[in-house]
Image (spheres, helix red, strand yellow):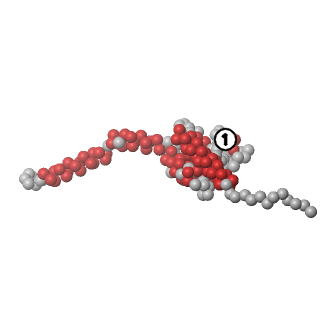
Amino acid sequence: MSNTNGINKANRRESQSRLIERRVAKMPLGGRNPKLASKISQMRLTIAPIVHVETGKAAPDFPYTMLDLFLLTEDQLDAMARFYSQTSPTWRTDQYPQTMAWDLPFLDKDPSLPDACKLSELERLKVKMRMFARFVGMRGADTPHWEYERQVEILSKKIERSVRQEEEESSLPKSYWGPSTRP
């Protein structure tokens, strides 16, 4: 190692790399990672609240930014659907610009159903989140192709299950006791 003015080459490389790190850290995020900067700005977009038709108040868990929307749980989405009268149709259900249609059969999460006859937890969350986004008027919240395909698949599995159950019931031995005799 050569020593020039008390600085060796290893120290010089370290100080240069620290200088570069400091300069990069001072750069705006858009210069360092434009895609990340774009996504963060999208997540900061605000959502205008939908208010209850009678009280005029927004739901307690209403997401005020896109990030808040993507962080909602299924329980929170269900609570907001109840708040806005979307789970069981009443006269208030159609008082909003859109409906959530929470009562669709493919959203059923009955534990007695086999997995093939219902959406997975993640799929159900995605569908409910999309329905809520459409409810609050977001563009691009149309039903995607995979969701239609999955609905048809679940319906066909339920039909197959029903037919199989009927066949099993009809194949049970039946006994005939003859005509009834009356005294």
Q: Position of residue 114 (x, y in %)?
A: 58, 55
- Location of residue 110 (image quadrant): bottom right
The amino acid on which the numbered mark 1 sits, given as a three-letter code, is Tyr
In the image, taking residue 65 as reference, residue 23 lies left or right, namely: left
Residue nearest the viewer, comparing 102 with 119: 119
Residue at which label 1 appears: 96
- Location of residue 135 (image quadrant): top right
Task: Name which residue lies at 53% across and 48% down.
Answer: 123
Residue 160 makes an appearance in the image: yes
Quadrant position of the C terminus in the picture: bottom right
Residue nearest the viewer, comparing 23 with 133: 133
Residue 51 makes an appearance in the image: no
Task: Name which residue lies at 72% across and 58% down.
Answer: 174
- Location of residue 153 (image quadrant): top right
Residue nearest the viewer, comparing 46 with 172: 172
Furthest residue toward bottom: 183
In the image, taking residue 160 as reference, residue 25 lies left or right, namely: left
